[in-house]
Amino acid sequence: MFGISDPWIWSVYLLCILSAAVCVIYGVVNWNKGTDNGKS
């Protein structure tokens, strides 16, 4: 498929896509949390 026969290359592509998705999800979850340093 797509001319890539090595399963290790497929696993690296999959891990890159999954890590990007995790970063996006983390960013969406923590978008408006900000920091709370005790100031009113």
Image: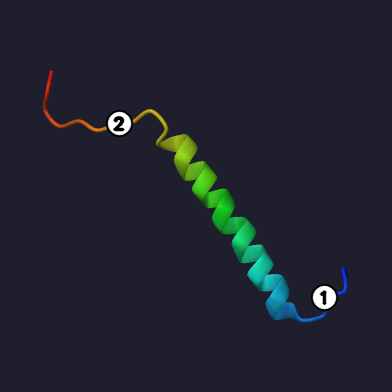
Residue at image position (68%, 66%) is 13
Residue under label 2, please give it: 34
- Which of the image's four quarters has the N terminus? bottom right
Indicate which disc, 1 or 2, sits on the residue closer to the N terminus: 1
**In-image side of 12 versus 1 (left or right):** left
Q: Position of residue 32 (x, y in %)?
A: 38, 28
- Disc 1, disc 2: CB below 8 Å? no
Q: Residues within 10 Å of mark 2 (few under 14, many from 20)?
A: few
Residue in the picture at 44% in, 36% down: 29
Distance between mark 1 and mark 2 Cα atoms = 43 Å
Q: Position of residue 14 (x, y in %)?
A: 66, 64
Residue 19: x, y in percent? 55, 57
Quarter of the image where the C terminus is located = top left
Question: Disc 2 residue type?
Answer: Gly
| Horizontal arrangement in the rendering, residue 6 relative to residue 36 (left or right) | right
10 relative to 32, above or below = below
Above or below for 33 versus 23 = above
Tag 1: residue type?
Ile
